[in-house]
Image: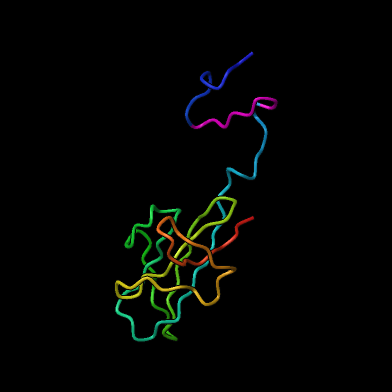
Amino acid sequence: MKHAEDYSPGTRYHPHKPNAYSARHLRKPVAFTCLARDAKEVFVAGDFNGWEAKAHPMQRLLDGAWRAEILLPHGHHRYVFVVDGRPTLDPNAQGVARDDQGQRVSLVAVS
């Protein structure tokens, strides 16, 4: 019988089905859109990037909105838009949660 340590780092181990497919390991593209016409720069910071404010820059669209597409794994993810250095909730988020410091953040579910 193989054990978890017998698998290479890129291999997904499952105790009953060592080569089984799992949706938990897939990443899906998630589109984020922020309406901030007067902004000079906008980023997405969240639990998926260690809350790094500049890890995911958004691109300005012709209509003044900003957009970024990020590959995220299955589950719920907390995030904020960082508009010219200021954390901003997403008014179109699927929900609102709290970060580790108790601040309100936006929530997106990926399935």
Q: Position of residue 79 (x, y in %)?
A: 46, 63
As drawn, 81 above or below 1: below
Q: Position of residue 42 (x, y in %)?
A: 36, 72
Quadrant holding the C terminus: bottom right
Q: How is the image coloured?
A: rainbow
- Horizontal placement of 41 versus 96: left or right? left
What residue is rendered at 45% in x and 54% in y? 47
Question: Which of the 4 quarters of the picture holds residue 67?
Answer: bottom left
What residue is rendered at 38% in x and 61% in y? 56
> Does the magenta stretch mainly form a helix, a strand or a loop?
loop
Q: How many numbered marks have been drawn onto this rendered protein structure?
A: 0
Q: Position of residue 66 (x, y in %)?
A: 42, 76
Question: Which of the 4 quarters of the picture holds residue 107?
Answer: bottom right
Residue at the far top: name it: 1
Residue range of the region highlighted in magenta in the rendering: 10-17
Q: Nearer the viewer, residue 91 or 101?
A: 101
Asked whether residue 11 is drawn in magenta, I would say yes
